Image (cartoon, rainbow, N blue to C red):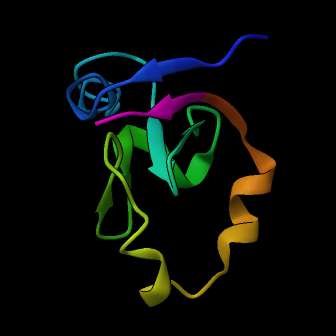
């Protein structure tokens, strides 16, 4: 599958509210977390989908390995 580029504005639409997709970005990669029960309705604890979570991960109780469960569906571009 070819990886597509997405802007922050395009990512923001995949927040579980505006569209059915629930995506988050981490270190330039966009992950589809739509199937995760932890991201239901586009929110996971105090974090909202449709955003780059790179700066927020150090405060999380888990490591970046959590993203290994999900498919990379795109690249976040400026």
Residue found at x 37% / y 75%: 56
Please state which of residues 30 and 47 is positioned toward the viewer in this rendering.
Answer: 30
21 relative position to 3: left or right = left
Q: In the rendered structure, does residue 76 fall within the stretch colored magenta?
A: yes
Residue found at x 35% / y 30%: 16
Q: Residue furthest top?
A: 1
13 relative position to 14: left or right = left
Q: Residue furthest front?
A: 78
- Give the quarter of the figure containing the C terminus: top left
- Give the quarter of the figure containing the N terminus: top right
Q: In the rendered structure, does residue 3 fall within the stretch colored magenta?
A: no
As displayed, is residue 60 above or below residue 27?
A: below
Residue stretch rendered in magenta on the structure = 74-78
Residue found at x 47% / y 86%: 58
Q: Position of residue 46 (x, y in %)?
A: 29, 70
Q: How many marks do you count on the picture?
A: 0
Q: Position of residue 48 (x, y in %)?
A: 29, 53
As displayed, is residue 71 above or below residue 4?
A: below
Residue found at x 20% / y 27%: 9
As displayed, is residue 74 above or below residue 56?
A: above
Q: Quadrant of residue 12?
A: top left
16 relative position to 58: left or right = left
Q: Position of residue 33 (x, y in %)?
A: 58, 39
As displayed, is residue 69 above or below residue 61?
A: above
Dominant SS in magenta: strand
């Amino acid at each position: 599958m070819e990886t597509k580029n997405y802007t922050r504005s395009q990512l923001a639409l995949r927040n579980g509210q505006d569209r059915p997709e629930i995506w988050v970005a981490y270190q330039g990669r966009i992950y589809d977390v739509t199937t995760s029960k932890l991201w239901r309705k586009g929110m996971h604890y105090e974090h909202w989908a449709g955003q780059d979570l790179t700066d927020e991960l150090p405060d999380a109780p888990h490591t970046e390995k959590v993203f290994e469960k999900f498919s990379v569906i795109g690249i976040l571009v400026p």
